[in-house]
Image: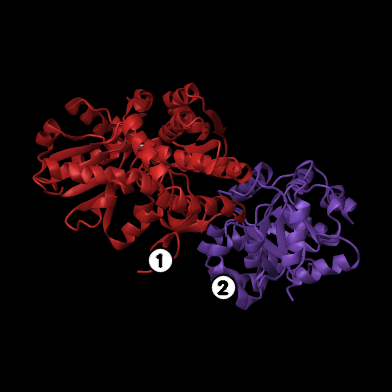
Chain colours: A purple, B red
Amino acid sequence: MNSMQIKIEEATKQGKVGLIPFLPAGFPNREQFWKELEELDNAGAAVIEIGMPFSDPVADGPVVEKASLKCLDDGIDLAWIFDGLRKRKGQFKAALLLMGYLNPVYQYGLDTFAADCEEAGVSGLIVADLPYEESGFVKDALAPHGVSLVPLVGLNTSKERMKMYADGASGFCYFVSVLGTTGQRESLPARIKEKLVEAGEVFDIPIALGFGIKHPDQLTQFAGLMDAAVFGSALILHIQSGKSSAEFMEPWK
Amino acid sequence: MIMKKGYFGDFGGQFIPELLMPPLLELEEAMETILPSEEFQTRFINMLKENVGRPSAITYCPNLSKDLGLDLWLKREDLNHSGAHKINNTLGQGLLAKMMGKDVLLAETGAGMHGVATTVAAAMLDMKALIYMGATDIVRQAPNVGRMKLMGAEIVSVESGTKTLKDAINGALRRWLSDQETTHYCFGTAAGPHPFPTLVREFQQIISREARQQFMDRNDGNLPDMVVACVGGGSNAIGMFHHFIPDASVRLVGVEAAGTGEPGCDNSAPLNIGSDGILHGMKTKLLQTDEGQILPSHSVAPGLDYPGVGPEHAHLHATGRADYVTINDSQAINAFKVLSRREGIIPALESSHAVAYAIENKDKLQGKSVFICLSGRGDKDLGILDQIL
Ligand SMILES: Cc1ncc(COP(=O)(O)O)c(C=O)c1O
């Protein structure tokens, strides 16, 4: 079983929500980034999602875009990410997940990318601009290295399309809570509930809710319908205001 | 050859977030049901005739032909209502969207020509126009911003990234994510995710359908030696090439923008110097770093200022059916002035790149018939020229 699923299920067995913090690689700067990861890991993250910077992040809102473009300016690239992870292999309790857009991964070379993921202890990949129709060659490259391609579905994904994604999926299913880009929101659309029920019927892997999430209070209404929560923009803003990752994680424990 | 859906050889596809797949699938379905319907076809053909003024003329250039020692012909898309080929596409997509039950036409624009043409379509069809435009382009194409506002468009200034066409597309894609229920994304060129490259070509192929016949009517049934068009995303070029593709004797030439022309300068010539990659929903040729980050583009012509190109051009380039060449800013500006002075036709800076190809290569083209797509008129560019001259 993919370690992302194992870690999320460890949390749910204790009656908790699996925590999936997201940070762009190299944020807020090269050195501090690894310290933030360590803090998130110690604070009980089930999976840590690391953003691979891209010049044109169309699925991201302004907070993530600005933060990751700055990392790009600082020279962060895939080689730097894998290098840092290789050095720290085995030090994280959480499973590791890379998130980004197809082009940088494609230029790196899919087979090399998959091999480097395995070597660096990365168990999953999210590609924001890769729908089911185009995903075959990516899955084929990842599979021999035990790396899962995490499916993304949302409020406008039909049950038929969810079934396409569910076929052979491993790790977890990422349920996008809004029709829109990443970024914290005060309230989440009411329709999430019925679609989460549908996703629960279709997927036999854990379901994580992401996009727009900033506080555990937002999630009480979805109790029993989801297994994990992803938070990015809210965590970035928190760190930018000079506060610690550990402090952000506190209300989630 | 059997091709994967939405592919031209190795290029094309639908590299887009899952959340945009439902509206793309809805659009594909409308292309199969609404587009061929008699109601759509009748209304569309009527609009092209009554509102756009089609068929657009072809013009022989007697003075410039003599100067250059070749036969120079122009397909006059600049004479279309709103001044460019863009309206062929926006009226098509606008009517399709209206019949799909959408209320809003969302568009990106670089030169502002596609924004203006989308706004015209929205006004005609009693819809709302929502236009994303890079902050840099808002300044350098001010006349078009004024036109759009007058006709009722809401304009969103895009402040991120390079603040030009690429970033306007990013902004529009993000907006479409959230507004897909009510809004059609009226993509401006034969690029982006499937089905846009095919849909836009469908609406622009009328250029060569008319042009091929008009040319033969004027030339005893003979075809031109060469067909030339500028290539930004590639919509006027694919429209001008389409019906000439089976004519093996006709050389097809797409002109990309070389920027200022110094070695290593920013440019807009992905087919000439780019490499395979994925951006804005398509696999195509891109200007990018080794790490797959998209490079800033540059051209004096805002409508060509884009680091990618439509996938069908990447395919025509790979198979060798079309040749893609470059023209730099100063060559284009020269052509802008030469065509204005010698023929009384002020071309758009984008189209000036195609005209410049004939001027710069006149020695190789002696005695040949060269048929250029004059994709737009140049009134919008006088401000840019004032600054440079
Ligand atoms: C007059 C004119 N020609 C050409 C272009 C380039 O677009 P395309 O390559 O899609 O024809 C533009 C784009 O704005 C334009 O305004």
Query: Taking B344 as reference, is A36 above or below it?
Result: below
How packed mark 1 is, by other alpha carbons closer than 10 Å (few <14, some 14-19, many 20 or more), is few
**What mark, if any, has residue B3 been given in the picture?**
1
User: Which mark is in front, 2 or 1?
Assistant: 1
Query: Taking B53 as reference, is A227 above or below it?
Result: below
Q: Which residue is tagged 2?
A: A141
Label 2 and label 1: CA atoms lie apart by 22 Å
Residue at (48, 50) in percent of width and height: B30
Q: Does mark 1's beta carbon lie closer than 8 Å to ligand 1?
A: no
Residue B289, visible in the rendered structure: no
Name the subunit of mark 1. B
Q: Are marks 2 and 1 on the same chain?
A: no
Task: Give the side of residue A13 with respect to residue A75, left or right.
Answer: right
**Location of residue B303 by image quarter:** top left
**What mark, if any, has residue A106 been given in the picture?**
none
Callout 2, which amino acid?
Answer: Ala
- As drawn, the residue found furthest toward the front would be B38
Callout 2 secondary element: helix
Query: Taking B284 as reference, is B345 above or below it?
Result: above
How packed mark 2 is, by other alpha carbons closer than 10 Å (few <14, some 14-19, many 20 or more), is some
Quarter of the picture holding the N terminus of chain B: bottom left
